[in-house]
Image (tube, rainbow, N blue to C red):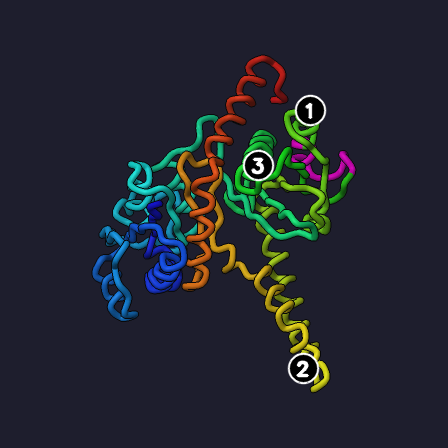
Amino acid sequence: MRIILDAMGGDLGCEPVIVGAVEARRAAGHDYILVGDVERLRAAFVRNKLSEDGFTLVHAPDIITMEDDPTRVVREKRQSSMAVGLMALKRGEGDVLISSCNTGALLTGATLLVGRVPGVRRATLGVQLPTKKEHGVIIIDTGANAECTPEYLEQFALIGSAYAETFGRVRNPRIGLLSNGTEAHKGNTLVKQTHALLEVMGQNGWIDFAGNIEAREVLSGDVDVVVCDGFAGNVLLKSIEGTASFMLSLLKKVFFANTMTKFAALLVKSQIENLKKVMDYREVGATPILGISRPVLKAHGASDAVAWAGAIRSAANYAGCGTEARIAEKMEILKGLKENGNGNS
């Protein structure tokens, strides 16, 4: 597998990308296309005493910042590492691309330079989180589309279902709609109209619709996919991340309160390490932009070498799971339902 890495898109420069990629190659192999300022890339290899074996370096002098306007950056920075990498992906020079540049720019670039799956109106971010049960839950959208229509959310339900089926290996995923109450009449206008669309789809067996779900039940494991607009999803995701960090800090205070609690901490050290690993975003590494015709993954802007190694693991697993093809199948079915008057909009 050939993995394209946007080496200049993150907050920490190219060094964590290179170190993480070398570690990933030692563990699992793969070949890499590193896109960025070649002089800076080579200097980072030398500085860290690392070999360039297995790496192809592609020059791209422009850098996209977090302040760049996503709608202008693709047109004005065609020689950025993100744009050059996306074009290489479109031409088939690599199997998957990972970038940690700003989300809006990557979403716009992937949409315009690589293209969406036929029938998809908006690409979206679907983040998978652990739950009380063995399987995880996919929250879709988590920030790609702050302004949504009911039809977008209807598609998100199908896109999330395709992702759960292929990457998560879940048969007939249960879909929940994020709201402020489980009753069908709860929620704002967007939620109520989306509920009506998903309810009809559920009644006809096109999805397994579980109805509305409250934020406090998202991690229960009762549903496999939670559908929401990008604004609500991003607030939900960051609230969960903040709560997890806060709980770990409280746990640390408890275990280091005195000699007895420190001894107790030693007894459960391995369990605590496993808990930290489950809650560490670096272990996940990257999230796919769902609905793009080729695999594109977004890594955290502050990703260190550990996070980049995790991102590469995620990308390698995702690239071969067939999510794009499954989304295309579902979009074709939805199109046929609308054309035959069996759809909802």
Residue 325 position within the rendered picture, expressed as x and y whole percent measured from the top left: 46, 31
Residue at 66% from the left image edge and 81% from the top image edge: 256
Distance from the alpha carbon under mark 2 to that under mark 3? 44 Å
Report which residue position mark 2 lands on. Answer: 262
Rendered view: 255 above or below 148:
below
> Which disc number belongs to residue 165?
3
Residue interval drawn in magenta: 183-194
Residue at 43% from the left image edge and 36% from the top image edge: 292
Mark 2 near mark 1, Cβ–Cβ under 8 Å?
Answer: no
Per the image, is 192 magenta? yes
Question: Where the N terminus falls, by quadrant?
Answer: top left
Task: Residue type at mark 2: give it.
Answer: Lys
Residue 314 position within the rendered picture, expressed as x and y whole percent measured from the top left: 47, 50
Rendered view: 276 above or below 31:
below
Distance from the alpha carbon under mark 2 to that under mark 1? 56 Å
Distance from the alpha carbon under mark 1 to that under mark 3? 21 Å
Which numbered disc, 2 or 1, marks the residue that appears first in the sequence?
A: 1
